[in-house]
Image (cartoon, rainbow, N blue to C red):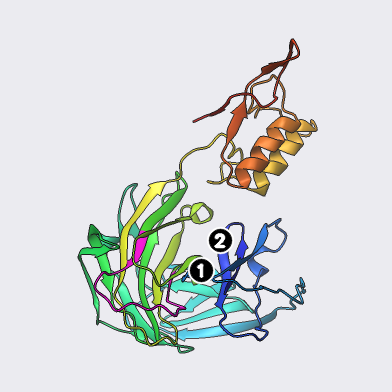
Amino acid sequence: MIFSIAVDGNIAWTLSVSKGSWQNGSVNLTQRAGQTIHLRLLADGGPTGGDYGWAFWSNLELDTVTPLSITVGMALPSGVTVTAFTGSGTLETSGTSVSITGTTVPGGFVAFLQPAVTLNDGQSLTGLSYTQYTAEVGQIPIASEWGTSVGTASSGGVSESGVLITEPANDGRSILGWTVQLPSDNPTQLSFNVGLEDGQPANSTGPGVIFSVLVNGTAMWSQTTINFGWIAGSINLSAFRGQSVLIELVSDTGTTGWYVTTLWSGLTFTVVPNSPCDVSHYGNTNVLDIQQLIGEALGKASPINDLNLDGAVNVVDVQIVIDASLKLGCLASGSVTLAGSRHPGLAGPSVQRK
């Protein structure tokens, strides 16, 4: 059974459980302080499919974390400087010495030691240089130069070119990292496919390989599989618009001892498609858009988002945005005739506005 917690649609915690005992877990929400968020508890029978079991969640509490503030010191090699900084704390430099003051625990930060590559729409990670690390279970990643190439590979009988072919450790993780500068003019998303290379030994018992995409050390997407065949994925990077970010691709065999070649294809940055339900222009439809529409419907903001074109911003427009935030599509209803009368805003033939 795979347990996961999603925050605003992004996986923030996941754990594969194969024995009947309680497992501890937590999600640090410090970075979301003062925000309204959407939490989802997810339970999946596992990559083998058809598994049946009871999933229990207990002690679900929102606890106040009293942060501990510390100073972290770093010694840089000669000629190396911090080119960008993000996260908890304030960066202070003096020659080759760097201090990050006011760092909260729990918390985290990323200090970039080389200029980020500026991205363009349609650009792929595959053609950019990367750093590679490996790590055994529970250990800190160390630099590695072994086991990754770019070429043509197939999964589930479907061949793709320009594939990153990685060799994860028997018991642990293979990590590829890029430092990139996201565009500031448009919200960006990263789309990709993952798969296990054909011809590898099968694993029918699980839990399989865990594919993850991390941004600045936080998991934004995760998928566990033991099956051959491409799996499509994407992450919305709108929250990092105009920033330097560390993107990491992780292939993790855990403690399975299953040595299998993992594949990453596509890995393309594109502009997030514009949706009329994204009224806050954040790059996706979320609680901010719902709050904006409620404010317009109550007369607390200018009524400029009449999504169903009935001449007013009202509860129907709010419902349209709620549906869109639940991934049901951004649908604008026209008016239909009921019992000889025309009723604007009721569900007739729906059209998707682009």
Mark 2 residue crowding within 10 angstroms, few (<14) / some (14–19) / many (20+):
some
Asked if one can make out residue 306 in the rendered structure from this viewpoint, the answer is: yes
* Residue 9 or residue 46, whichever sits in front: 46
Mark 2, residue position: 10
| Disc 2 + disc 1, Cβ < 8 Å | yes
Report the magenta residues as a range.
193-211
Q: Reply above or below: 273 against 233.
A: above
Q: In the rendered structure, which amino acid carries the disc numbered 2?
A: Asn
Rendered image quadrant of residue 234:
bottom left
Quick one: quadrant of the N terminus? bottom right
Q: Residue at x 75, y 78 (%)?
A: 66
* Residue 297 or residue 209, whichever sits in front: 209
Q: CA distance from mark 2 to mark 1?
A: 8 Å
Q: SS for tag 2?
A: strand
Rendered image quadrant of residue 310:
top right
Q: Residue at x 71, y 36 (%)?
A: 318
Asked if one can make out residue 116 in the rendered structure from this viewpoint, the answer is: no
Percent x, y for residue 210? 44, 73
Q: Residue at x 29, y 79 (%)?
A: 201
Left/right of residue 150 with respect to residue 190 in the rendered view = left
Q: Residue at x 29, y 75 (%)?
A: 261
Mark 1, residue position: 219
Percent x, y for residue 326? 62, 47
Give the farthest residue toward the left.
151
Q: How many marks?
A: 2
* First-in-chain label (2 vs 1): 2
Mark 1 residue crowding within 10 angstroms, few (<14) / some (14–19) / many (20+):
some
